[in-house]
Amino acid sequence: MKLSKIFPFLYRKDKVLYPLFINQATVVENAAKLLVNLLKAESYDERNELCKQIKACESQGDSIATQIFETLYKTKRITFDRVDIQQLASMIESFLDLIHDSAKKLVIYHPKHIDHVWVEIGESIQEDAKIITGIIKELGNLDEKAKFLMQKCYTIKEIEHEVDDLYECYMSNLFEVEKDSIEITKNKNIIETLEDTTDMAKEIADGIKTIIVKLA
């Protein structure tokens, strides 16, 4: 079955929804880049300023998601692809929310130091965001690039598995090295949110794979 029959919004001349999805993914990618900068920042003031910029990205992303949902609501013709569209937009929005939550915890908790593992996971989140943006931009060519995009989804899954390994090693070492119970709680909450962010990226990839499978 042709993609045009499943997701006609990608093929309409006005392409109202498609640019919104691209904008949403681009905002997420910008936020992920800011998160890495925050993790590498040397001062609290710098981290606080970057967190504010990420918050601005989150607000922008919320606005775009609202536009997507309103556009779907206003569409009179009901097709089964509407649920897939809404779910994809919701997951991307959640991904952005988790990026902001990660940044917010780093500022609010003000840990004694930024662990290199956090930076590695932050860079993985940024890579996820880049891949997702690339996939969204190619959705209109899904008929021709289904196999390529499916592989990109598997790459996100591989990243999530790598982060799981980093998370497990970090948690194991945390209770061995850190003796301050307050710092343990701070660090545990920070890395859990970072890890949850990569989990959400995998959920987005799984959602896109579902869309691709519907072409069969």
Image (spheres, rainbow, N blue to C red):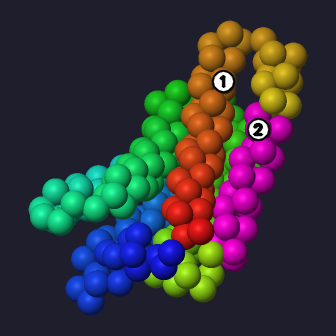
**Where in the figure is residue 96, as x and y percent of width and height?**
44, 51
Which residue does the image show at 74% across and 61% down from the upper left? 155
Relative vertical location of residue 216 with respect to residue 41 in this rendering, above or below: below
Looking at the image, can residue 116 be seen?
A: no
Q: Amino acid at mark 2?
A: Asp
**Where in the figure is residue 31, as x and y percent of width and height?**
47, 58
Q: Tell me, yes or no, whether the highlighted magenta stretch contains residue 151.
A: yes
Q: Which residues are magenta?
A: 147-167
Query: For numbered disc 1, what is the local secondary structure?
Result: helix
Q: Residue at x 81, y 16 (%)?
A: 175
Label 1, residues with CA under 10 Å away: few <14, some 14-19, many ≥20: some
Q: Quadrant of residue 111?
A: top right
Spatial separation of the CA atoms under disc 1 and disc 2:
14 Å
Comparing labels 1 and 2, the label whose residue is closer to the camera: 2
Q: As drawn, is 163 to the left or to the right of 136?
A: right
Q: In the shown orientation, is residue 168 left or right of residue 137?
A: right
- Please name the residue shown 18% across and 66% down the image: 77
Q: Position of residue 137 (x, y in %)?
A: 49, 78
Q: Reading the chain from its start, which is encountered first: label 1 or label 2?
A: 2
Q: Quadrant of the C terminus?
A: bottom right
> Residue at horizontal 22%, vertical 60%?
78
Q: Is residue 53 above or below residue 118?
A: below
Query: Is most of the magenta stretch helix, strand or loop?
Result: helix
Residue that carries the numbered disc 1 in the rendered image:
188
Lateral position of residue 94 relative to residue 135, left or right = left
Q: Nearer the viewer, residue 195 or 71?
A: 71
